[in-house]
């Protein structure tokens, strides 16, 4: 009887530890398919970047709000997605060769850290560096209409797959092929 209690307690402790640990993965990643037929070489920024952003995400019929914190340098990118109350949902780091990602067991969305990283890069990094990181059949352009700056990624068939609009401290990132939009607000 005592052995059964001990085994039960050990099992509960193991499950509790696994629950708290979440799901961690380390993947050697150099490219990410940002759209069908468009692999992008992941990059490290050429300058230090520190951002805190409030993101309203829409995926099909679902809407979510999260806080994203980013610390990036020419050596590493570290990102964390938090609930509006500060609970960590996921985090990732990229050193130029490997994406290490962690996901809370409470975060049920399908998640691949390399896609979050690619979205961040497409919206934030230097246009010329991104153009070199994309295949020759695609096209990433930038133009300005009034106060709105716009980045558009076209596939080989000249169809818009990603549209990013910048207006002051607001960024609207829409992935038309995957049917999601992010309304990003830079926080002080």
Image: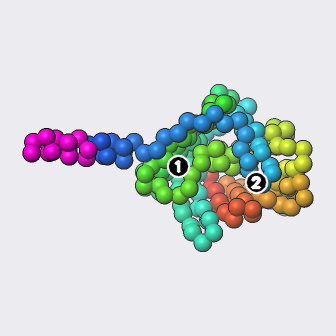
Front position among marks 2 and 1: 2
Quarter of the image holding residue 182? bottom right
Quarter of the image holding residue 127? top right
Q: Secondary structure at mark 1?
A: strand
Q: Contact (CB < 8 A) between labels 2 and 1?
A: no
Q: Is residue 38 magenta?
A: no
Q: Secondary structure at mark 2?
A: strand
Residue identified by numbered label 1: 81
Residue identified by numbered label 2: 35
Residue placed at 86% from the left, 61% from the top?
Answer: 159
Residue placed at 49% from the left, 47% from the top?
Answer: 103
Q: Position of residue 48 (x, y in %)?
A: 66, 33
Residue placed at 60% from the left, 45% from the top?
Answer: 113
Q: CA distance from mark 2 to mark 1?
A: 22 Å
Q: Farthest residue to the top: give it.
A: 75
Quarter of the image holding residue 71? top right
**Residue interval drawn in magenta:** 1-12
């Amino acid at each position: 009887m005592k052995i059964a209690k001990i085994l039960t307690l050990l099992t509960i402790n193991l499950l509790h530890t696994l629950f708290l640990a979440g799901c961690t993965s380390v993947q050697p990643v150099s490219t990410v398919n940002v759209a069908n037929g468009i692999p992008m070489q992941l990059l490290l920024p050429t300058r230090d970047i520190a951002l805190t952003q409030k993101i309203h995400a829409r995926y099909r019929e679902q809407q979510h709000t999260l806080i994203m914190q980013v610390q990036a340098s020419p050596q590493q990118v570290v990102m964390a997605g938090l609930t509006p109350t500060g609970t960590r949902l996921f985090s990732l780091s990229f050193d130029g060769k490997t994406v290490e990602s962690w996901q809370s067991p409470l975060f049920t969305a399908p998640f691949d850290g390399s896609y979050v990283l690619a979205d961040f890069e497409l919206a934030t990094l230097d246009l010329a560096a991104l153009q070199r990181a994309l295949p020759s059949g695609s096209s990433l352009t930038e133009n300005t209409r009034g106060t709105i700056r716009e980045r558009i990624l076209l596939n080989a068939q000249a169809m818009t797959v990603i549209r990013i609009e910048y207006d002051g401290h607001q960024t609207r990132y829409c992935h038309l092929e995957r049917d999601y939009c992010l309304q990003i607000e830079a926080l002080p």
